[in-house]
Image: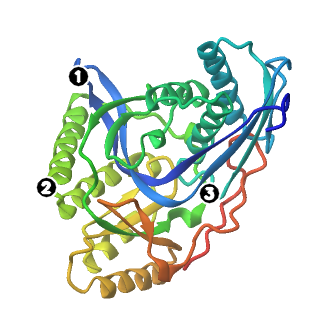
């Protein structure tokens, strides 16, 4: 590095494929809090580069593209945290973001941007922030965050508080996921979704699903995990109301899948298969044909479980060429998702 040149840092973050379970749960003190368990997915993610400008005013912090306002807030918060830790004065800088995560489908695009931004700022200071600190900054920047800073471990995460309610185990049972987009892939404005009242009976139901998911992870039971994901997805329909949901669950049963999962704040969904089931390729092909027949665009087929999630090669990359919306962190048009 040239002496006196601005110190640059880089950071990355993955995305996810919606949720396996989302609802209202009890923490260790018995207090209710919203929580979720995401389905990890390798593939598109966010990358960030941050160039610190020592001597520049803190408000002189720019972001490219300019519409990534949540990531800009996260970068400013991260500068304050890193400056405090290193004893350096606050300063401005430039944040640049790249990535191909579709916006508005419930794949964690804004959380991925935010986490990559925080990591890039920390790297520019020569720091590596712990996941709890990253989670706290992410929640402050976007009010709620997905647990992408924690890697692929299955955790029940309080998205509005940035804390882990429970580590469910080291890894999910192995799965083959046939991804698709409901509603034609039209992005969902999560802020416009109606709030639903949750009574004690609902909390008990979510706690039962939590216990079943814990058992599925402990025993590697893909079928039990699929049942939990389907039950959670069905509950999510009270708010999302995807017209294709019943057709999706019916074709999943006919294809021999263990269940379905959805993004509770988006349009992405997945048909879940046990990779140990006989005739897996035949089942997956049948599922893809059924999705096409129902007019539900397939996106990508990938595996997840004891190893990092990876895409099944013969289906090729999905979500390629998906545009980000022009407005600040708000979907303005449907994401383009090629059917494979």
Q: Is residue 204 above or below residue 299?
A: above
Q: Left or right: where does residue 255 sit relative to residue 148?
A: left
Local secondary structure at mark 2? helix
Q: Nearer the viewer, mark 2 or mark 3?
A: 2
The residue depicted at 36 percent of the width and 85 percent of the height is 286
Q: Quadrant of the C terminus?
A: bottom right
Q: Nearer the viewer, residue 193 or 112?
A: 112
Q: Quadrant of the N terminus?
A: top right
- Residue 6: x percent and y percent? 82, 31
The residue beneath circle 3 is 102
Q: Upstream in the sequence, badge 3 or badge 1?
A: 1
The residue beneath circle 2 is 219
User: What is the CA distance from the residue labelled 3 to the residue labelled 1?
Assistant: 35 Å
Q: Left or right: where does residue 52 sit relative to residue 132?
A: right
The residue beneath circle 1 is 28
Q: Are marks 2 and 3 in contact (CB under 8 Å)?
A: no
């Amino acid at each position: 590095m040239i002496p006196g040149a601005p110190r640059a840092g880089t950071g990355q973050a993955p995305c996810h494929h919606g949720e396996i379970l989302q609802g209202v749960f009890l923490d260790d003190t018995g207090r209710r809090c919203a929580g979720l368990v995401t389905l990890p997915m390798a593939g598109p993610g966010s990358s960030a580069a941050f160039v610190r400008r020592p001597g520049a005013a803190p408000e002189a912090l720019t972001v490219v593209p300019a519409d990534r306002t949540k990531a800009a807030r996260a970068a400013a918060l991260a500068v304050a945290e890193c400056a405090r830790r290193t004893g350096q004065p606050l300063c401005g800088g430039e944040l640049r973001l790249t990535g191909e995560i579709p916006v508005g489908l419930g794949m964690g695009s804004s959380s991925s941007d935010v986490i990559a931004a925080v990591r890039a700022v920390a790297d520019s200071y020569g720091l590596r922030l712990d996941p709890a600190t990253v989670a706290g900054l992410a929640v402050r920047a976007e009010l709620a965050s997905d647990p992408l800073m924690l890697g692929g471990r299955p955790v029940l995460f309080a998205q509005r508080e940035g804390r882990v309610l429970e580590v469910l185990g080291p890894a999910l049972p192995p799965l083959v996921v046939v991804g698709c987009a409901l509603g034609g892939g039209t992005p969902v404005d999560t802020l416009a979704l109606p709030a639903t009242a949750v009574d004690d009976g609902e909390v008990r139901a979510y706690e039962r699903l939590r216990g079943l998911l814990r058992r599925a992870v402990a025993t590697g039971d893909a079928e039990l995990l699929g049942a939990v994901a389907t039950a959670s997805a069905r509950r999510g329909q009270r708010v999302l109301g995807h017209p294709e949901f019943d057709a999706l669950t019916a074709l999943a049963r006919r294809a021999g899948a263990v269940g379905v999962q959805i993004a509770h704040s988006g349009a992405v969904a997945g048909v879940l298969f046990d990779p140990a089931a006989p005739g897996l390729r035949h089942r997956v092909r049948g599922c893809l044909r059924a999705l096409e027949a129902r007019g539900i665009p397939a996106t990508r087929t990938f595996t997840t479980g004891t190893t990092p999630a990876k895409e099944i090669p013969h289906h090729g990359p999905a979500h390629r060429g998906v545009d980000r919306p022009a407005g600040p962190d708000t979907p303005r048009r449907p994401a383009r998702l090629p059917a494979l």
